[in-house]
Image (cartoon, rainbow, N blue to C red):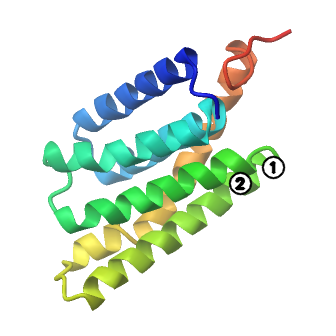
Amino acid sequence: MNMDLRTVVRTAVIAGVAIAFQALNLRQPITGPGINAILYVASIYIGPVSGAIVGVLTPWIALLTGIMRFAPAVPVIMAGNVTLALVSGYLHRFNRYFAMAFAAALKFAVMTFGIKYLIAQGTQVPAPVYTSLTITQLITALAGAVVASIVLRGLERFGGNRHGGSRS
Protein backbone atom coordinates (compact mmCIF):
# COMPACT_ATOMS: atom_id res chain seq x y z
CA MET A 1 0.00 0.00 0.00
CA ASN A 2 1.36 3.36 -1.00
CA MET A 3 0.95 5.77 1.91
CA ASP A 4 0.62 8.92 -0.16
CA LEU A 5 -1.01 12.03 1.26
CA ARG A 6 -4.44 11.04 -0.04
CA THR A 7 -4.24 7.66 1.72
CA VAL A 8 -3.05 9.24 4.97
CA VAL A 9 -5.88 11.80 4.88
CA ARG A 10 -8.51 9.18 4.06
CA THR A 11 -7.22 6.97 6.88
CA ALA A 12 -7.35 9.90 9.30
CA VAL A 13 -10.88 10.78 8.21
CA ILE A 14 -12.17 7.23 8.60
CA ALA A 15 -10.41 6.93 11.98
CA GLY A 16 -12.20 10.12 12.98
CA VAL A 17 -15.51 8.63 11.85
CA ALA A 18 -14.80 5.53 13.96
CA ILE A 19 -13.93 7.62 17.01
CA ALA A 20 -17.01 9.81 16.55
CA PHE A 21 -19.18 6.71 16.23
CA GLN A 22 -17.70 5.30 19.43
CA ALA A 23 -18.32 8.63 21.17
CA LEU A 24 -22.04 8.15 20.63
CA ASN A 25 -21.73 5.52 23.38
CA LEU A 26 -24.37 3.25 21.88
CA ARG A 27 -24.91 -0.36 22.93
CA GLN A 28 -22.71 -3.10 21.47
CA PRO A 29 -25.39 -4.40 19.06
CA ILE A 30 -25.11 -1.03 17.29
CA THR A 31 -21.48 -0.07 17.93
CA GLY A 32 -20.03 -3.50 17.06
CA PRO A 33 -21.46 -3.74 13.54
CA GLY A 34 -20.76 -0.04 12.98
CA ILE A 35 -17.08 -0.27 13.88
CA ASN A 36 -16.70 -3.51 11.90
CA ALA A 37 -18.33 -1.84 8.89
CA ILE A 38 -15.88 1.04 9.21
CA LEU A 39 -12.98 -1.44 9.34
CA TYR A 40 -14.23 -3.21 6.20
CA VAL A 41 -14.69 0.08 4.34
CA ALA A 42 -11.24 1.32 5.37
CA SER A 43 -9.63 -1.97 4.34
CA ILE A 44 -11.40 -2.46 1.04
CA TYR A 45 -11.84 1.12 -0.16
CA ILE A 46 -8.62 2.69 1.14
CA GLY A 47 -6.37 -0.32 1.73
CA PRO A 48 -5.63 -3.10 4.23
CA VAL A 49 -3.07 -1.07 6.17
CA SER A 50 -5.61 1.74 6.60
CA GLY A 51 -8.09 -0.72 8.09
CA ALA A 52 -5.41 -2.17 10.35
CA ILE A 53 -4.48 1.30 11.64
CA VAL A 54 -8.11 2.07 12.46
CA GLY A 55 -8.46 -1.39 14.01
CA VAL A 56 -5.56 -0.72 16.36
CA LEU A 57 -6.87 2.71 17.39
CA THR A 58 -10.49 1.84 18.18
CA PRO A 59 -9.91 -0.47 21.18
CA TRP A 60 -7.58 2.08 22.76
CA ILE A 61 -10.15 4.82 22.29
CA ALA A 62 -12.80 2.53 23.76
CA LEU A 63 -10.60 1.94 26.82
CA LEU A 64 -9.68 5.61 27.26
CA THR A 65 -13.29 6.77 26.98
CA GLY A 66 -14.66 4.07 29.30
CA ILE A 67 -16.57 2.16 26.62
CA MET A 68 -14.31 -0.84 27.25
CA ARG A 69 -13.55 -1.34 30.92
CA PHE A 70 -11.56 -4.56 30.69
CA ALA A 71 -8.01 -3.48 29.80
CA PRO A 72 -6.58 -7.00 29.26
CA ALA A 73 -8.94 -7.35 26.28
CA VAL A 74 -7.42 -4.43 24.34
CA PRO A 75 -4.64 -6.48 22.67
CA VAL A 76 -7.16 -9.24 21.89
CA ILE A 77 -9.52 -6.77 20.22
CA MET A 78 -6.62 -5.19 18.34
CA ALA A 79 -5.56 -8.61 17.03
CA GLY A 80 -9.12 -9.39 15.95
CA ASN A 81 -9.56 -6.03 14.23
CA VAL A 82 -6.23 -6.27 12.42
CA THR A 83 -7.11 -9.80 11.28
CA LEU A 84 -10.44 -8.60 9.92
CA ALA A 85 -8.83 -5.63 8.18
CA LEU A 86 -5.95 -7.49 6.55
CA VAL A 87 -7.96 -10.54 5.46
CA SER A 88 -10.83 -8.53 3.98
CA GLY A 89 -8.47 -5.94 2.51
CA TYR A 90 -6.28 -8.44 0.70
CA LEU A 91 -8.86 -11.07 -0.28
CA HIS A 92 -11.66 -8.78 -1.53
CA ARG A 93 -10.11 -8.77 -5.01
CA PHE A 94 -11.16 -12.40 -5.43
CA ASN A 95 -14.64 -12.16 -3.94
CA ARG A 96 -15.71 -9.35 -1.63
CA TYR A 97 -18.44 -11.30 0.14
CA PHE A 98 -16.28 -14.34 0.76
CA ALA A 99 -13.46 -12.08 1.96
CA MET A 100 -15.70 -10.34 4.48
CA ALA A 101 -17.27 -13.58 5.75
CA PHE A 102 -13.88 -15.27 6.02
CA ALA A 103 -12.45 -12.21 7.78
CA ALA A 104 -15.35 -12.29 10.28
CA ALA A 105 -14.75 -15.98 11.00
CA LEU A 106 -11.02 -15.44 11.46
CA LYS A 107 -11.62 -12.42 13.72
CA PHE A 108 -13.87 -14.61 15.86
CA ALA A 109 -11.22 -17.36 15.98
CA VAL A 110 -8.38 -14.96 16.84
CA MET A 111 -10.37 -13.25 19.57
CA THR A 112 -11.63 -16.53 21.04
CA PHE A 113 -8.06 -17.83 21.13
CA GLY A 114 -6.92 -14.57 22.72
CA ILE A 115 -9.54 -14.64 25.46
CA LYS A 116 -8.84 -18.33 26.19
CA TYR A 117 -5.14 -17.47 26.38
CA LEU A 118 -5.87 -14.73 28.93
CA ILE A 119 -7.89 -17.21 30.98
CA ALA A 120 -5.10 -19.81 30.77
CA GLN A 121 -2.69 -17.16 32.10
CA GLY A 122 -4.91 -16.63 35.14
CA THR A 123 -6.81 -13.52 34.04
CA GLN A 124 -10.30 -13.44 35.49
CA VAL A 125 -12.57 -12.76 32.53
CA PRO A 126 -16.16 -11.97 33.55
CA ALA A 127 -18.75 -14.09 31.73
CA PRO A 128 -20.38 -11.11 29.94
CA VAL A 129 -16.96 -9.97 28.70
CA TYR A 130 -16.15 -13.48 27.50
CA THR A 131 -19.40 -13.62 25.52
CA SER A 132 -19.02 -10.12 24.08
CA LEU A 133 -15.47 -10.90 22.92
CA THR A 134 -16.18 -14.31 21.38
CA ILE A 135 -19.45 -15.32 19.68
CA THR A 136 -20.81 -11.79 19.74
CA GLN A 137 -17.79 -10.71 17.66
CA LEU A 138 -18.73 -13.14 14.91
CA ILE A 139 -22.28 -11.79 14.82
CA THR A 140 -21.23 -8.13 14.84
CA ALA A 141 -18.54 -8.72 12.20
CA LEU A 142 -21.05 -10.40 9.88
CA ALA A 143 -23.59 -7.63 10.49
CA GLY A 144 -20.85 -5.08 9.81
CA ALA A 145 -20.14 -6.85 6.51
CA VAL A 146 -23.74 -6.30 5.43
CA VAL A 147 -23.54 -2.59 6.28
CA ALA A 148 -20.12 -2.26 4.64
CA SER A 149 -21.40 -3.93 1.45
CA ILE A 150 -24.04 -1.23 1.11
CA VAL A 151 -21.59 1.58 1.87
CA LEU A 152 -18.96 0.21 -0.51
CA ARG A 153 -21.49 -0.12 -3.29
CA GLY A 154 -22.45 3.52 -2.79
CA LEU A 155 -18.84 4.66 -2.68
CA GLU A 156 -18.05 2.80 -5.88
CA ARG A 157 -21.14 4.06 -7.62
CA PHE A 158 -20.91 7.69 -6.61
CA GLY A 159 -17.40 8.20 -5.32
CA GLY A 160 -15.12 6.68 -7.93
CA ASN A 161 -13.11 3.52 -7.56
CA ARG A 162 -11.19 2.53 -4.47
CA HIS A 163 -7.59 3.41 -3.62
CA GLY A 164 -7.94 7.04 -4.60
CA GLY A 165 -8.60 6.92 -8.32
CA SER A 166 -11.53 8.51 -10.07
CA ARG A 167 -13.85 6.79 -12.47
CA SER A 168 -12.88 6.88 -16.11
What's the residue type where badge 1 is placed? Asn
Q: Secondary structure at mark 2?
A: helix
Q: Position of residue 131 (x, y in %)?
A: 33, 74
Q: Which mark is residue 95?
A: 1
**Can you see residue 34?**
no
In the image, residue 100 sits, relative to residue 25, either above or below, namely below
Q: Is residue 105 left or right of residue 61?
A: right
Residue at 52%, 41% (x, y): give it. Answer: 51
Q: Nearer the viewer, residue 52 or 134?
A: 52
Q: Is residue 84 left or right of residue 164?
A: left
In the image, residue 38 sits, relative to residue 165, either above or below, namely below
Residue at 22%, 40% (x, y): give it. Answer: 25
Mark 2–mark 1 CB contact (< 8 Å): yes
Q: Residues within 10 Å of mark 1 (few under 14, many from 20)?
A: few
Q: Secondary structure at mark 1?
A: loop
Question: Quarter holding the C terminus?
Answer: top right
Residue linked to disc 2: 99
What's the residue type where badge 2 is placed? Ala
Q: Position of residue 111 (x, y in %)?
A: 42, 70
Q: Position of residue 128 (x, y in %)?
A: 24, 73
